[in-house]
Image (cartoon, helix red, strand yellow):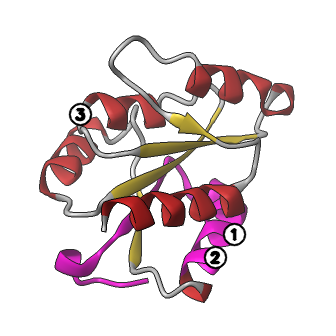
């Protein structure tokens, strides 16, 4: 995990450390591909002001947002930036279908890419493909 914001390409944001098994998978892929990244634990509900401030100052090119239950985090991030946001639904309840549907059904002009339930690896691979297009 890099700490130099000027060089960060991907930021992973999870609402809770309970999502560690998901974001660790994404981090592994990013590390294996030498993609600079950082991890932030910021809840859209509990840390909304900190999340707002972070998004305003973040230089990352792509966000990966990991969220379960109502899965508001990816949509909140996408509503505050024009950078690509990839949502990873977590199987906290209902097998993750609630989170999946929350991430997929974004309102107009708030796009969020979505990968499969608990699929942090694919989120990282998608981020890498996006980076290849914008470099």
| Marks 2 and 3, how far apart at CA | 26 Å
Q: Judge whether residue 86 is colored magenta.
A: no
SS category of the residue bearing label 2: helix
Quadrant of the rendering where the C terminus is positioned: bottom left
- Dots 3 and 1: beta carbons under 8 Å? no
Mark 1–mark 2 contact, CB under 8 Å?
yes
Which callout, 3 or 1, points at the residue further toward the start of the chain?
1
Label 1 neighbourhood size at 10 Å, few (<14), some (14-19), many (20+)? some
Is residue 40 something one can see in this rendering?
no
- Rendered residue at 38%/37% (across/down): 46
Give the labeled residue for mark 3.
Answer: 80
Q: Residue furthest top?
A: 108
- Relative to 94, does residue 13 appear above or below in the rendering? below
| Residue 81 x, y percent position in the rendering | 24, 39
Q: Is residue 57 left or right of residue 125?
A: left
Q: Is residue 49 above or below residue 56?
A: above
**Disc marking residue 106:** none
Figure quadrant of residue 131: bottom left
Disc 3 to disc 1, how far (Cα)?
26 Å
Taking depth in this image into account, of 121 and 69 the one nearest to the observer is 121
User: Is 106 drawn above or below residue 89 in the view shown?
Assistant: above
Q: Is residue 28 magenta?
A: yes
Point out the stretch of residues depicted in magenta: 1-30
**Residue occupied by mark 1:** 25
Residue 24, by quadrant, is bottom right
Q: Which residue is mark 2?
A: 29
Precedes in sequence: disc 2 or disc 3: 2
- Observer-nearest of 20 and 121: 121
- Position of the N terminus, as image quadrant, is bottom left
62 vs 30, left or right, is: left
How many neighbours does mark 3 have within 10 angstroms: few (below 14), some (14-19), or many (20 or more)?
Answer: few
Tell me the SS state at disc 3: loop
């Amino acid at each position: 995990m890099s700490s130099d914001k000027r060089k960060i390409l991907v930021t992973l944001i999870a609402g809770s450390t309970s999502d560690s098994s998901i974001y660790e998978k994404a981090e592994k892929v990013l590390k294996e591909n030498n993609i600079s990244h950082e991890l932030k634990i910021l809840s859209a509900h509990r840390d909304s002001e900190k999340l707002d401030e972070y998004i305003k100052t973040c230089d990352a090119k792509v966000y990966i947002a990991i969220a379960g239950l109502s899965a508001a985090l990816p949509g909140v991030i996408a509503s505050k930036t024009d950078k690509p946001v990839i949502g990873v639904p977590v199987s906290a309840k209902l097998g993750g279908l609630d989170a999946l549907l929350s991430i997929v059904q974004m309102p107009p002009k708030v796009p969020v890419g979505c990968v499969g339930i608990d699929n942090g690896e694919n989120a990282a691979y998608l981020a890498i493909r996006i980076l290849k297009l914008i470099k």
